[in-house]
Amino acid sequence: MIDHVALNWDDVVVATYRIEQSFRYVYPGPIFDLAHRLVVLPRLVHADQRRLSRSLSISPHGRTRSADDAFGNEVVTFTSARIDAGFEIAVEATVLRSRASGPHEVGAELLEHARYREGTALTAPDARLRDAASALRSRARTTRDLAEAIVDFVHREIAYAKGVTDVATTAAEAFALKRGVCQDFAHVALSIARACGLSARYVSGHLLGEGATHAWIEFILPGPGGEAIALSYDPTYGVATSLQYVVVAVGRDYADVAPTSGVYTAPYAGTLEASTHVHVREVGYA
């Protein structure tokens, strides 16, 4: 493994990463009719990123099914009639990223696609978010200027704080609190972007050194030749993303790409222990 902190990332043009994740659910007794959904395997292809290998194992064994969702993410569904005390999930994947020589082109239909332009339950704007959108839109000369202004605004307006929000917190609630974690930054940025009339999507994945899943956004904007391009920004840190980010999935908001979620029948709740490790395996320089 390579120490990513010691690398001069400005000179790196290609990098290979190894992702290792584990999830352990424990229950005080048996649970029944488990249906669990996993969005943890990196996309096969995303911009300059390529998935080289993947594996997912669940113990005890049950029935698993893998299929792509409407956004092109690989979703694994795990079902079991009965689990006695808990279950464990182990994920491994290898991905390759290279410094792109051109923009990330996407289908032109995404510019007007309702799924990325309309608010969702988690991103619907309130009056304060609409006011912020109006002010930012009035000062921007181009759509790219507007996108970057939104990212900078959200980064400055919200303080990073754990434990004050959860996965059900809306963009309006996080903006009122002025605090949150990465998914809150992403939701607020998406809410403002869509209120400005831009097409934008939620991205889940990994950032080197985080030790947990991370979230950021992509704006879908008109390209110079009439095509559509995706521009990737991290509002938590107020920067354009780099080779140190690994994409797992894209969607309208967190609910579309929650890494692990599910339902079961039992009169009690369980506990979850999770760990994430992303290692740099190999790099190439210009």
Image: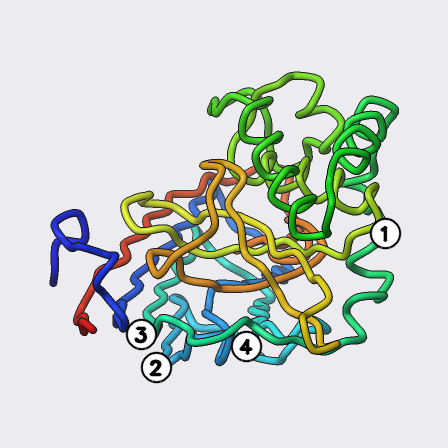
Q: State the image quarter where residue 170 is shown.
A: top right
Amino acid beneath label 1:
Glu
Distance of label 2 from label 4 (alpha carbons): 22 Å
Residue 255 in the image: state x and y as whole percent: 68, 50
**Circle 4 residue:** 63
Indicate which disc, 1 or 2, sits on the residue closer to the N terminus. Answer: 2
Q: Quadrant of the C terminus?
A: bottom left
**Circle 3 residue:** 94
Distance of label 1 from label 3 (alpha carbons): 34 Å
**Circle 2 residue:** 53
Of labels 4 and 1, the one closer to you: 1
Residue 2 in the image: state x and y as whole percent: 12, 60
In front: 27, or 168? 168
Distance of label 4 from label 1 (alpha carbons): 35 Å
Please state if 228 lies on the left or on the right of 26 as rendered. right
Of labels 2 and 4, the one closer to you: 2
